[in-house]
Amino acid sequence: MKKEKYFRDELQHMFISYAIVPAVIFTLLCGLFFMAALLHGRKSITEENNAYAAAQLEQILKRYEDGIKQLSARPEMFGETMDTRSRAGIFEEFYGITNSLDVKGDLFVMDRDRNILLSSRGDRPAYLDVPEGVSWGIFWYMDSRPGQTAVKLVEGWRSQQSTIALGRSVEREGQTVGYVVCAIPGSQIQQILDRLETQTIITDSYGWVFAGSNYNFISKSNQVLGVLERAGHYLSYDKQMYLVSGSQVYHRLFNVYSISDIQNIVISLSLSSMLVITALAMMTLWMLFRARKVTETKTEDFYRILDVMENARSGDLESSIQIDSDNEFRIIADAFNETIGSLKLQMENNRKMTELVAMAQNKQLESQFNPHFLYNTLENIRYMCKLEPATAERMVFSLSNLLRYSLDGSKDQVTLKEDMEHLENYLTILKRRFGPRLGFQAEIEPEAMECRIPKLVLQPMIENSVKYGFGNQLNLKVEMKVYIHEGKLMMICRDDGVGIPQETLSELNAMLEQKENTSRHSGLYNIHRRITILYGRPYGVEIRSTEGHGTTLVVTLPVVREET
């Protein structure tokens, strides 16, 4: 009763403390994060659109300013020589400005009495009919700043069709001889604003609207509302939420406002959060009810599993769990039974592995140190003792190390570095036997040197190349490459020998997959068998060869680091 009660209560507590409460908190945090991300993204879009609109307006006004300056400096302007050809040249230069900007404006060239000499349109606009002597209008600004470009928003107080006028008074010998005025209709800038993702309003420094795609913040008198001028990044107006980005352009004479409506985003996220919280609350109540019912029926299966696990920990691997119910406890029971089966199989494989390793080492020693091999080696040592005592000493040392390493049965696995040291002793003897006829080159990644591998892996790879590679050719080159690739230790031995016929190659590959070896190729078979028992597939030995083009042995192992 005590175990059953504890399990039930603990499960209920777990549902509340570790599932429901974190889920609610996580949902709220995700909602807030998602809202912040959406608002940040919308804010970035708003700022980017504002910067774009401001840059476009700045570029247009500066280009027109430069154009007016160039036109005013033309020598034929206001002269008696301003014939038809001169007029055509003036219009050509002006239209070059408008075409480069893709913004169509109007050109007016007037004499000192404000009579139109040249005009790109057929009528005279009202903003040019300003009486002399008044302290407003484009002519007053041009006369008060001789030699400079005057910029003025005209008609903005009259209608939605505002115009920006840029003009310069032209002087000759200290006297005003005329005026050059370029006008940019708001409709041309409106085309740029209509392409933006956000609503945009352009005003002069006094708040008069030049162009805009948002009419909620424009008064009937065509002025921007003060609430927009005073707004920060976020604006609450008329029960709506907005994002606002503002810029001042062209000597602070104009303001650009970009506005994004975020009311729908706030409402949608709020409703979604409320629905999720409500659903979580209802789910909590349902899970508490179900938890009590489930724990009452699952406790029996739970402790049945627990009893068998306790027996297994004591060493009893013959017991199995039998669960009749079709639920997660049956999955646990089946997984436990499979684990115990795998453990018993692994124990049997380990026993076989011990036997196989001993057999492999004995067969390897027999193969390496057959009477012919020893005879040749000792004969070389005998002659070297008379002719080259130092060389004889090195060969005796190498043979001694080779015997000691192969006979040492204290460990089945070594580092790649250790097996390479053993291979160096073996190569010392081979190079003395074959001389310059045998070439060897090794390329090993430093990272691979500390990886653990089964003992006596490298030597049979070299031995196979030397034994079957020479054939009827005089010289043999053997290359060894070891590297780590995609979590696997790749050991590749490649020679330029006579190769293996296709039929023989097929027999060799088939031999590697046999449980028992009846062929004379014991070295490669023992390596492959040991690797597959230790690590399973896809690890093992692969033989690649083409007759007349050499042989390649590929040994694939898992990356097992040296323990420190």
Image: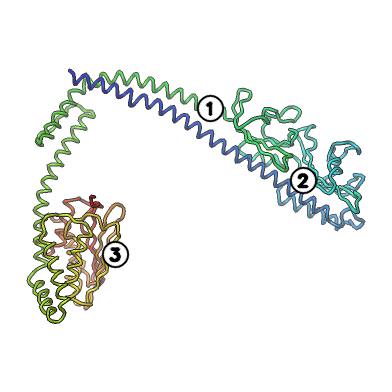
Provide the residue designation for mark 2: 105
User: Dot 1: few (<14), some (14–19), or many (≥20) neighbours within 10 Å?
Assistant: some
Residue type at the position of mark 2? Gly
- Image check: 149 left or right of 275? right
- Dot 2: element: loop
- Image check: 235 left or right of 118? left
User: Dot 3: few (<14), some (14–19), or many (≥20) neighbours within 10 Å?
Assistant: few
Q: Which mark is residue 266?
A: 1
| Residue that appears at 75% across and 46% down | 104
User: Dot 2: few (<14), some (14–19), or many (≥20) neighbours within 10 Å?
Assistant: many
x and y, in percent, of residue 207 in the image: 73, 33
Provide the residue designation for mark 3: 443
x and y, in percent, of residue 340 in the image: 14, 38
**Is disc 2 in contact with disc 3, using a CB cutoff of under 8 Å?**
no
Pick whichever of labels 3 and 1 is earlier in the sequence: 1
x and y, in percent, of residue 332 in the image: 21, 32
In the depicted structure, whether residue 561 falls above or below residue 392: above
- Image check: 542 left or right of 372? right
Pick whichever of labels 2 and 1 is earlier in the sequence: 2
Residue type at the position of mark 3? Glu
- Name the one closer to the observer, 59 or 323: 59
In the depicted structure, whether residue 493 falls above or below residue 42: below
- Image check: 409 left or right of 43? left
Structural distance between the alpha carbons of marks 2 and 1: 42 Å
Pick whichever of labels 2 and 3 is earlier in the sequence: 2
- Dot 3: element: strand
